Image (cartoon, rainbow, N blue to C red):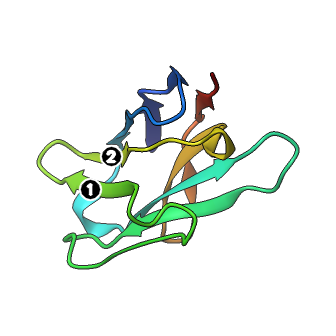
Amino acid sequence: QVRLVESGGGSVQPGGSLRLSCAASGFTFSNYGMSWYRQPPGKERELVASITPTSSSKNSADSVKGRFTISRDNAKNTVSLQMNSLKPEDTAVYYCRRNTYPYVWGQGTQVTVSS
């Protein structure tokens, strides 16, 4: 069964850090690009960052550049998102996604940034 499971969300004060992880199973993880998306309250889901199968290329949204870093470990079938200098506007449910159709989504993990 193809599955993605996110973890690492929580509540943090502005300026803090969190590391999200996404564990993949049921498919050959190293063959697929992966992405992190987020959906702020009352807004559309948006792309945060993407990484190619061999980590040769990464990209991120302008809103998180210099603060968030995507990485992957193909030996452990995981993709991570290191989030530093968090802002209240980063509050959202964060999802990982397998990039090739048919897309596969995780269930999401809540990140709340508030003082």
Residue occupying the point 42% across, 67% down: 50
Of residues 43 and 65, which is closer to you in this image?
65
Q: In the image, 95: left or right of 50?
A: right
Q: Which mark is residue 19?
A: none
Residue at the spot of label 1? 71
Corner quadrant of residue 41: top right
Residues marked 1 and 2 touching at CB (< 8 Å)? yes
Q: Is residue 1 visible?
A: no
Q: Residue furthest left?
A: 75
Residue occupying the point 38% across, 44% down: 84
The x and y percentages for residue 104 are 55, 53
The x and y percentages for residue 80 are 32, 46
Could you tell me the amino acid type at mark 2?
Ser
Q: In the image, 60: left or right of 11?
A: left
Residue occupying the point 35% across, 43% down: 24
The x and y percentages for residue 33 are 37, 68
Of residues 13 and 72, which is closer to you in this image?
13
Placement of the C terminus among the 4 image quadrants: top right
Corner quadrant of residue 82: top left
Of residues 52 and 112, which is closer to you in this image?
112
Placement of the N terminus among the 4 image quadrants: top left
Q: Secondary structure at mark 2?
A: strand
Residue at the spot of label 2? 80
The x and y percentages for residue 5 are 45, 33
Q: Residue furthest bottom?
A: 57
Could you tell me the amino acid type at mark 1?
Ser
Q: Secondary structure at mark 1?
A: strand
Marks 1 and 2, how far apart at CA: 5 Å
